[in-house]
Amino acid sequence: MCGIVGYIGKQDAKEILLKGLEKLEYRGYDSAGIAVKNADGIQVFKEKGRIADLRAIVDENVAANTGIGHTRWATHGVPNRSNAHPHQSTSGRLTLVHNGVIENYDLLKREYLQDVAFQSDTDTEVVVQLIEKFVNDGLEVEEAFRKTLTLLKGSYAFALLDSQNEQTIFVAKNKSPLLVGVGEGFNVVASDAMAMIQVTDQFLELMDKEMVIVTKDSVSIQKLDGAEVTREPFTAELDASDIEKGTYPHYMLKEIDEQPAVMRKIIQAYQNDEGKLTIDYNIAEAMNEADRVYIIACGTSYHAGLIGKQLIENMAKIPVEVHVASEFVYNMPLLSEKPLFIFISQSGETADSRAVLVAIKELGYKALTITNVPGSTLSREADYTLLLHAGPEIAVASTKAYTAQISVLAILANVTAAFRNQEVNFNLVKELGIVASAMEALCDSKEAMEEIAREYLSVTRNAFFIGRAMDYFVGLEGALKLKEISYIQAEGFAGGELKHGTIALIEDGTPVIALATQENVNLSIRGNVKEVAARGANPCIISMKGLETEGDRFVIPEVHELLTPLVSVIPLQLLAYYAALHRDCDVDKPRNLAKSVTVE
Ligand code: M6R
C-alpha cells in the first residue's frame, strides 16, 4: 500500500528517495512520485506505473538535498499521473505526500475550499489545499498544518514541504505507519525502516496524532496541542542483505526456500537453555485464564489462524474462534466472559485487524499479536507480542510468514498445554525438526512442481483445491496463492461440500488439486476426487507418505499429523509460483495488490 520516504541532509536527495521507493515497491503501488527542494523552489516528478518509469522522467541534473517521495496504491481516483503524489497547493508553495484515507475530505472541501480548482480526485489534495488556505489566512505553515490535522477524520501519514522553508520537512501520523530515521547531519522519513536501512538503522517510533518537525540536525516530536515529546531511537534489526534477492529470480521463490531455515530459527528462538519450549509467562497465564480465544486476521494470516485453532484446541484444550478482521469489527459475535484476542499479522500494520484491536481494547480485553515486525502498530498496541522470526517478507504473496505463523501458534499451544497440565503425547521440538527437514526435501522438488503447474495450470481459467479437516484449510491457502499471483480463478473447498453446488462448475479438464494428508479422512477425500473425476475434472492428488495410493501425482514426506499444513502448503506455493511464471505474470508484485494493507 502507499509508501512514504523523505530525506533532509547534504547528499543527493533524489537518489536516496528513488532508492527508498524501490525498497517500498514490495508494498504494492500503481504510481509513484518525488518532490525535491532547493533554492530554486520545489520540483515534482510523478508517473503512473513502476519506479523505473518514474526514474525515467526525473531530471538527472536537479541538485537538491531535501525531498519527499511516495508510492501510491489508488483509493480515491484512478491510478494516473494527476492522482499520483506528491500533491501541491494552488500557489505551488506546499507539497504533500500521504498514506491513509481522509474520511471527511468531501465535507472539508465543501466547508473550506469551495473556490479551489482541484487538479486531482484525491483526498490528499484537499489536505494540502486546506493547509494553504490557513496559511493564506495568516498562519505560519507549522500552525496551518497543525490546525488542519485537528480537522481530519481518518488515517494518515504525511510528509510536507514548504518552498519558502528549505530547512524543514513537516511530518504527521495517525493510524498509518511512519518512522523518522536519525543520522549524523541528516534525517529521514519512511513508512518502513527497510526503505532507509541503507542510510541509518536508528529510528524513532511515532504515535498516533503526533506531528514532527524534521530538519537535517534535529527532530522535534509534538502532540497536536504543541506539547513536546521526548523519545529515544530504536535500532532496526534489519540486515540490508535480507532484503536483496541475491541470485533468485523472484523474492517469492527465495522466501519459499527460506522456510526450513526459518523453522529452525523459530525453534531456537523459543527454546530455553534446557532445550524446552518457552514463551513469556504472562502470555501463558493470559491463555490459561481465557475461557475462549478469538483469533483475528486477514488473508493468509487468517488461513494460519484456522490451523492455529486446531493446534490450540488439540493441545491446550481451550475453545477457539477464528474471524476475518474486516467482518468482525462491524459484526461482532456474542463474546465469552473471559476472551483473549490473538491478532495474526505478518506486517503488524493491517488496518482491518487494527480496527478490531482498537474496538476490543475499548471493551477492556487483552490482546496478543503474532507478527513478523517488532514495533509494528499491532505489536505496540497489544498487551503481548510473539515474533515470527521469519526475516523480511518482500513478495506480496505470503509464504514463509504463513508457515512461521503456524509454527509459533503450535509453540503457543504447546507451552499453554504444559501450563495447564494438559498432556501432549509428542515432542514438538523434535517434530518441528522433522518438519524442517521435510520442507528442505520439498523445496528441492521444484522441477516436479514446475511440471505439474505446466500440465494442470498453464492454460486453465479456473482451478479447485479440495481437502478435508486441516487439508481443507491448506487448500484455502493454496487457492489464495494461485489466484493472487497467476489470476486463475481458484477456490478452496471442503471435499464434502463441492457436491452441494459447486460441482456444477466442473467441466472437462477442470484442474482439481486434492490434498490427502489426514489419515481419518483419507478415504473420504479420495471418494470426493472420484466424484469430480467422473464429471470430467482433471484431479491432481498430493498425498502424504504412508497414505499414498497409485496414481497420486506427488507424495510429501511424513510429518506429525497436526503439523501437516507446514509441509503440504509448500507444493501449493510452488504450484502458484510456476503457474504465474508460465503465464508471464509479475510474481512478486501482482496487479491490484499491496503487501501491507493499511486502509480498511
Ligand atoms: O500483514 P498481514 O498478515 O496482516 O496481511 C494480511 C493479508 O493482507 C495477507 O496475508 C495477504 O492475504 C497476502 N497477500 C496473501 O499472500
Image (cartoon, grey):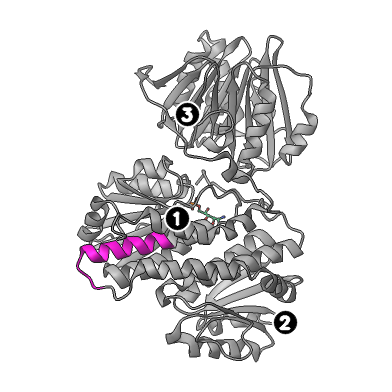
Give the x, y percent position of residue 472.
49, 75
> Residues in magenta?
407-423
On the image, numbered disc 2 is attached to which residue? Answer: 509
Q: Residue at x 26, y 70 (%)?
A: 317
Comes first in the chain, label 3 or label 2: 3
Q: What amino acid does circle 2 point to?
A: Gly
Q: Is residue 443 above or below residue 218?
A: below
Magenta stretch: dominant secondary structure: helix
Q: Which mark is residue 403?
A: none
Please name whichever residue, 467 or 418, is drawn nearer the observer in this view of the structure.
418
Q: What amino acid does circle 1 point to?
A: Lys
> Is label 2 in contact with label 1 (beta carbons under 8 Å)?
no
Comes first in the chain, label 3 or label 1: 3
Q: Is residue 339 magenta?
A: no
How many numbered discs? 3
> Is label 3 in contact with label 2 (beta carbons under 8 Å)?
no
Q: Secondary structure at mark 3?
A: strand
Please name whichever residue, 169 or 556, is drawn nearer the observer in this view of the structure.
556
Q: Is residue 350 above or below residue 209?
A: below
Q: Which mark is residue 265?
A: 1
Q: Is residue 512 above or below residue 392?
A: below
On the image, numbered disc 3 is attached to which residue? Answer: 202
Q: Secondary structure at mark 1?
A: helix
Q: Secondary structure at mark 2?
A: loop
